[in-house]
Amino acid sequence: MKIIVCIGSSCHLKGSRQVVEQLQYQINQHNLKESVELGGTFCMGKCQQGVCVTVDDKFFSVTPETVGEFFRTEILEKLA
Amino acid sequence: MRKFDTKIQYLKYKVLCEVARQAWNDTLYDNLFDIPKTIVPGNVPTMRCCVYKERAILAERVKLAMGGNKENPNVIEVIDIACDECPVGGFEVTNACRGCLAHRCEDVCRFGAISFDDDHVAHIDKSKCKECGACAKVCPYTAIVGRKRPCQNACKIKAISMNENRAATINNDKCISCGACVYQCPFGAIMDKSFMLNAIDLLKKSSEGRNYKMYAVVAPSISSQFTYAKLGQVITGIKSLGFHTVVEAALGADMVALAESKELAEKGFLTSSCCPAFVDYVHKSFPELKPFISHNLSPMAAISKYIKETEKNAKVIFIGPCTAKKAEVQKESVKPYVDAALTFEELQAMFDSRDININSLEEGVLDNASYFGRIFARCGGLSEAVAEGLKEHGIDNFELKPCSCDGIEACRTALLKKSKNLLDANFIEGMACSGGCIGGAGCLTHGAKSKSDVDKYGNEAMEKTISDAVSLLNFI
């Protein structure tokens, strides 16, 4: 599974650093380093919907507040 | 508001703009020979002796706007026919000499070059004169003047002389492509080659990102430019040229600051590697100091390398204040990462060639780097960032003693001292342009406010530490 987080200017201002930090934390907590790959990109072209995240090319709009829920439903449950 | 400092920049801009317009329309090669006439219509000369000479010079400018002479490796070129063959007499006594009795000029001359005729009028023996200018400074009548060409005056590393036709000529073995002469020549007879056509070609073939993505990496000195609009509007303007996105070179500066501070603590002495003209100067004039040059890529190259490594389908265009960057991107170590380097002058021309009025655009955002990465644009910023880097690494057993060199003369002094082991510093921050990058020859305007503009922009960065800004890159 590959998660890509946008680290371009707009998403950065909306908290992509916090999103990345929480995702890294969760991946470590759940020992998912083998199955989940985290990556970044500058701009996905959907700046209005930032923080932009894709999981295996499927698009999600995430915020530092919703990233926990996102991880649970879109990563943990899908992997289970 | 004024877009340029000088009319020469404006003239150069008109050529760049017209060349770009034709290139976008795929009509450049059809209309190539008509461009000079488009810029100088009619038959009344406004600049030179006749419209034909004006057009001949413009034709040369068109050539340079299209990449210039491929045989000449230097990115800075002289337009022979535009060179006005300014006086080159060196120090001369003018008829303001009153034949006074004090003879301060004679006393101050350490080379015995001054003598007097029967009327006490001073004369300078050219074979002895070293052009130090001491006599001119002490003359109570300011009767002694130094007649040096503006280009030679601008070139502090003495790479410009005159050829047999009395036109300026550049010694490529010495020239560091800083562009000081380009900005200073009052006739616009020295120009930087433009690689704008490469950029336009890449933009067109990307088909708005369908074939590959175009990344613009912009230098932090952009904060002192385009003062007639907001920075956010400039960013939107860049995107409307066909760029996928805009990334701060200052984020590369953050990466460099962290790496360079570590390297400095390990080695004990370093000279900076950010300014390509300074690095070139060390190579050409102080080869014995080469081992001390930091091994880091420049901020531009560092962030571009990152972009290319994380995005397979990326092309990178650097946009900045610098003519020497045009040479840097041709180096084997940088070539794979940056596809072309443009100046702010060229960016303005590209905007206008597409009739993009940035004032009317919505404001985009630009926020990748920290305060420290952003202040690289002005002299002293790099040293501050290295000090911060040492702090963030937790290195407390190394005392940073920076020597921030403002302009190439200050760089020379520091390098000379270092070569004689007389330098009381362990880090040379070398900036070839006075004031740092904000003094670059490719800037649209150079003003007293430039430094405070950069500091303001630095303070606006969301990330307050270098590590926080760079942490976003390291997780990948």
Image (tube, coloured by chain):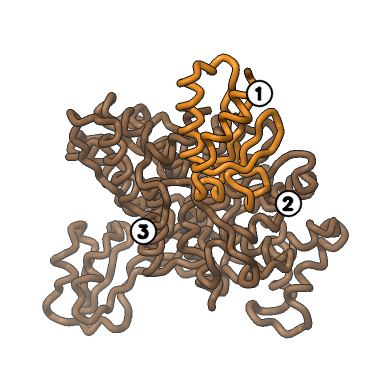
Chain colours: A orange, B brown
Residue at image mark 2: B200
- Per the model, the C-alpha gap separating discs 1 and 3 is 47 Å
Which numbered disc covers residue B455? 3
- Per the model, the C-alpha gap separating discs 3 and 2 is 32 Å
- Per the model, the C-alpha gap separating discs 2 and 1 is 44 Å
Residue at image mark 1: A78
Label 1 crowd bin: few (<14), some (14–19), many (20+), radius 10 Å: few
Q: Are marks 3 and 2 in contact (CB under 8 Å)?
A: no
Dot 3: chain letter:
B
Label 3 crowd bin: few (<14), some (14–19), many (20+), radius 10 Å: many
Quadrant (top left, top right, bottom left, bottom right) of the N terminus of chain B: bottom right
Percent position of residue B464, x then y: 36, 47
- Quadrant in the rendering for residue B268: top left
Q: Nearer the viewer, residue B17 or B310?
A: B310
Q: Nearer the viewer, mark 2 or mark 1?
A: 1
Percent position of residue B421, x then y: 20, 34
- Amino acid of disc 3: Asp
Dot 1: chain letter:
A
